[in-house]
Image: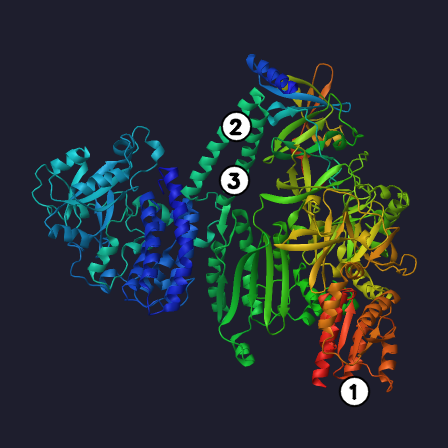
Amino acid sequence: MAIIEDQELLQMFLEESREHLDGIESDFLKIEEMGEEIDSDLVNNVFRAIHSVKGGAGFLGLETIKNLAHSMENVLNLIRNGELVPTPEIVSVLLSSLDLLKELVQDYESSNDVDIGDHLAALEKAAAGEASASQEAPSAEAESPDPPSQESPSPEEGPNPSTEPLKAGDEETTLVLPGGKEALVVSTAALRSAVEQGKRLYLCEFDWEGDLDRKGKTPQDLLEVSAKAGEVLSSGVSCADIPGLEDQVGGPKVPFFILLACGEDVSSLKETFGLPEEKIFTVTPEGAVSPCEPAASGPAEEPAKAKVEEPPEKPAKAPESNRIPEVPPKPTPPKDQKSSEKKQASPPPSSQGAKKKSETKKPPSKLKSLSPHNNTLRVHVDLLDKLMNLAGELVLTRNQLLQNFLNEDEVALGNAVQRVDLITSELQEAIMSTRMQPVGIVFNKFQRVVHDLSKSLGKQVKLVTHGEDVELDKTIIEAIGDPLTHLVRNAVDHGIEPTEVREQAGKPLPALVKLSAKHQAGQVVIQVEDDGRGIDPEKVRAKAWEMKLEDKEKLDAMPDNEVIRFIFKPGFSTAQTVTDVSGRGVGMDVVFSNLSKLGGSIDLHSKVGEGTRITIKLPLTLAIIPSLIVKVGSSRYAIPQVGLVELVRIPPAQIKERIGRIDDAALLRLRGEILPLIRVADILETKTMVSLPHGEEIVERRKTLFDRRTPNFHEEERRDPPGEDRRKGERRKDSGKACNIAIVNAGELHFGLVVDELLDSEEIVVKPLGRHLRGINTYAGATILGDGKAALILDVGGIANAANLKAVKDKVRERALDNKISNIQDAQSFLLVKNAEDEHFAVPLGLISRLEKIHKDQIERTSGKQTIMYQGGTLVLCSIEEVANVKPRADVDHPYVLIFPFAGKELGILVSEILDVVECANDIDEESFRQPGILGSTIIDDKTTLLLDLYGIASNLFPEWVEEKTQTQRGGQTETATLLLVEDSKFFLNQVKGFTKDAGYEVKTALDGVQALEILNDPETRIDLVLTDIEMPNMDGIELARRIRGHSRYSRLPIIALTSVASEETKSLAMEAGMDEYLIKLDRDNVLERIAYHLSGRSRQG
Amino acid sequence: MMEESKAIDLVQRGNGQREPEEILELAVFKVGEIICAVEITEIQEINRNLDITPVDNAPEHIRGMMNLRGNIITVVDMRAMFSMKVKEKPDNDTRILVVESEGELIGLFVDKMLDVIQAPKKDIEPPPSNIQGVAGRFFSNIYKMEDALAGVLDLKEILKTNER
């Protein structure tokens, strides 16, 4: 029965022990790895950790823990001295003992009732160099170890072995007081050596309560005093003879013993400690204790007496297992023993406790399960100081605030408020950092997991970890343990092939499992990677089909990387045999949902035969998260920034264009992508406050969430008076009619949430919801907004599920192709700008290199030119009205400059306002508004918009620049080259034809690939270069390029792609098809330059 | 706030009296026409901050949630609980009784606080078996007041989550 006096002390011990024990596991593995070449630092480290656990446990009377630690220490000592080679078997024994030790420390209250006999025996065997083969369950014989005297027949055996059958071995002696009380366990070697040095041995008995507590002393004080008087050989608490502390109301006696070796006599000791005589005993080198007399004649007075006196209440035979730790067989000479045993606080096993143990012993496995959560946290003192400082600052500033408020001093008040702001953020940061812990805490334990697992599976696996220093919030650290364990186990069990298979496949051994953590964009990315067999999408398909998760056709059509995500579905496992490790068909879905709960996401990449990589993204902390506040109906909601991709606002006029539908699903067209749209209001149906008979089904849910959606959009459209108020420039502020969309992602899924209003970005504190609301998966929690009102936090993943987005996505995929085909018209991105108040202009976005907002005072006028200082140089500016016949630019304070390259330099065009970037596939009217500087007109947002001709403007204003350029470009060109221009849009055809002709080339045109081939095949014509659009009817540019390249005659013909969409995908497609260049239409300068380059290259070759 | 201090007053007055017999202190309030009672020791506070945020998709007897000094608490609409027509808007008499249940604070949205009374234990009886439906289910006891009956709420039953 453990007597635990001091809760605080106990807590400290437990914390420290946990820390010590957690730290050394990986050290054990390293020790095993190194085998005979022992790193003594490493062993020492482990030894120290175990030793301090032992010391603390002894001090607190946690006998079982102490005994186990002691036995482990013995083995380690042998290893340290090089007398024992740490074979895998021995390390296994140590590891399993370590596990038990951890359990015991965790459950210290009942630790003394746990039977550790098996482990002790195994350790003993290990120490004897014959580690038991089965680490978990040492054999039954191990429980009755050989008498220690046989193993090490030491001549220094206690003097009266025959009268003391239970005597604790050759190395240690239990000091038993004359009254029968057991005091301390000490090493006989220490006793002997002290006596040899001519010192006397005294055992001082202190009363914890009377001598320590009441005098305000700590054991530490006592020990310090003792150390002055002589050498402290041992000290500790004996809890043996205190049957029921609570019974002894008057005087609970918790004796605290110090064994002192000193040259002084008893009377001086009496003075030093203020102890009565009867509390000081003399001790013989053999360990016999006798009451001292004022003039103790000699240390070895009654050597046998104390030993013979059996404590009356002591059971006839103490359970052997209890004794084993006291008698570890030691082939080592006593010298070594001494060094490790010296100065240990190790009280003897209690006879009382022993009795109890024999009755209530239980196997270790019956300990209650470990809780991984620590309720305490160690914080660096510096950090604490910083917090103190900040708290002080806060108080000071509060005082200032009050003062200034009373004085109505607004300026000072403002300053104080600002300080509060700063201090609060700093305080928040500091407090958050106390919660941050390195992810290595979790990673380290996987060394062991992989070690044990690979062993039991007979595989060779090595775990490599990276980024242990990456810090995460404590709650997250605790929560990712289980999911990660599962993933690592999966990797070893399912991912890594058996050794033979790997050998056959020529894969390296040992197999690698990589665990890494890194910071990325405000999140922590953790990867579990293995180089095993990978996940076979076909198997997953088959299994998914078997489980009827999806239709066969759909499964076949699904891309592989999506198919393998099925393993996150409940009950899914592709392991062919169910092992006890994993593969019970539960797990990945749990991992998935656990991580989702943490606000994390999980991604899976796998290649058959090469391995699997699982990527987990986690927020740094759960407590405070940046969020976007949106409004739906009358309520506000928070969307965590983590899931947020971008915000999109669709003006009313574009709703019809940009928001389409497939069957019952609404879709948003965004930069060529098609995203499902969810109306938040549909998911969160406003609750009807209507009474219903008790117990009846409450709310009638809409059958599909999209039923009402599309009409809603159209409704909005109808409500929109065409073009009226937009003319006043209020369109962008008019949020009632535009469609506000927050693009979010849940895992790999991107989709748009339609909300009524986008409000603000706020850092919110996440609060849990009450238990009645916890089951609603559309919410991730609640928070309190700035005005004190409670608001819900939307769970993006939950919403995706609620809306059954999966189904929508499938439809999107089905229709995406159709869409592409029907959408073959060129959609060009235009920058929409304003110059005069009511005139809109559009500029092809691809032509503009940068946009700058300037102040009108920055514009300088020198020799008739407008310039500004820009990036250390001078940028020449021009205005549209200088060339084109349009209204002059509105005089605004902050005009914008569109910067574009021209004739090898940069030029800026001034405009008054930038409106938007739009994609426009509308026809361009080249006739009505054609004039210098204007290419034509089109209708964007129901408004006539003029297309700016940047080159027209520039060359009109600076003709000399163009000439210079042309000279240099055409310098070496003597013959007139013939270009073939293939383009289906008449507008672009004319544009490009125009400027290439101006540059002096012959230009032939074709409207599609088929026509182009006809021209090329005409033996009469010689074509020097092909300029082609990519997307065209009949035959597109890519196919054209392939055909041209397929023809021997044209194998060297330069082909330049001209396009409006600069997507990487198309670009690489184009390059594969054999195109030489990939340029943006209307980027005249560049196009001309590249044409010249390719033509000159050709002539060089030809 | 006033209401709170009044409640505290009542409690103190109650404590001041000598107690010849075992007495329970009950907070009595109205939900619709039903008079309900909750033992005063189960109530943490009576609040008239009615800034409740509705929670969509929640069970229909949940009125919403609110900020109680930094904690989010769920508010149960007692009218909905008793299958009555719920009030669209709180009025001057509406109160929120904050009770603790399974380590969590929960607000009960009630129509009107009536009184805090001293109820001799002998006058508190189990509900008669002929009370069916709502009452039988949610009342653990019935207290006979001078002019009416008050049902002592079985908070455990009312705040149960699994089946609703």
Q: Of callouts 2 and 1, which one flags the residue occurring earlier in the amino acid sequence? A: 2
Asked if residue A251 lies left or right of residue A288, the reply is right
Q: Amino acid at mark 1?
A: Arg
From this viewpoint, is residue A311 visible?
Answer: no
Q: Of callouts 3 and 2, which one flags the residue occurring earlier in the amino acid sequence? A: 2
Query: Relative to B52, does residue A451 appear above or below in the rendering?
Result: below
Query: Measured from the top left, where is residue A406 in percent x and y?
Result: 56, 20
Query: Measured from the top left, where is residue A730 in percent x and y?
Result: 82, 41
Q: Quadrant of the C terminus of chain A?
A: bottom right
Q: Helix, strand or loop at disc 1?
A: helix
Query: Measured from the top left, where is residue A687 in percent x and y?
Result: 78, 38
Q: Residue A762 falls in which quadrant of the image?
A: top right
Query: Measured from the top left, where is residue A486 in percent x and y?
Result: 56, 59
Q: Say which mark, if any, is on residue A1049.
A: 1
Tell me the CA gap for discs 3 and 2.
16 Å
The chain letter for the residue carrying disc 1 is A
How is the rendered protein coloured?
A: rainbow
Asked if residue A53 lies left or right of residue A969, the reply is left
Q: Which residue is mark 3?
A: A426
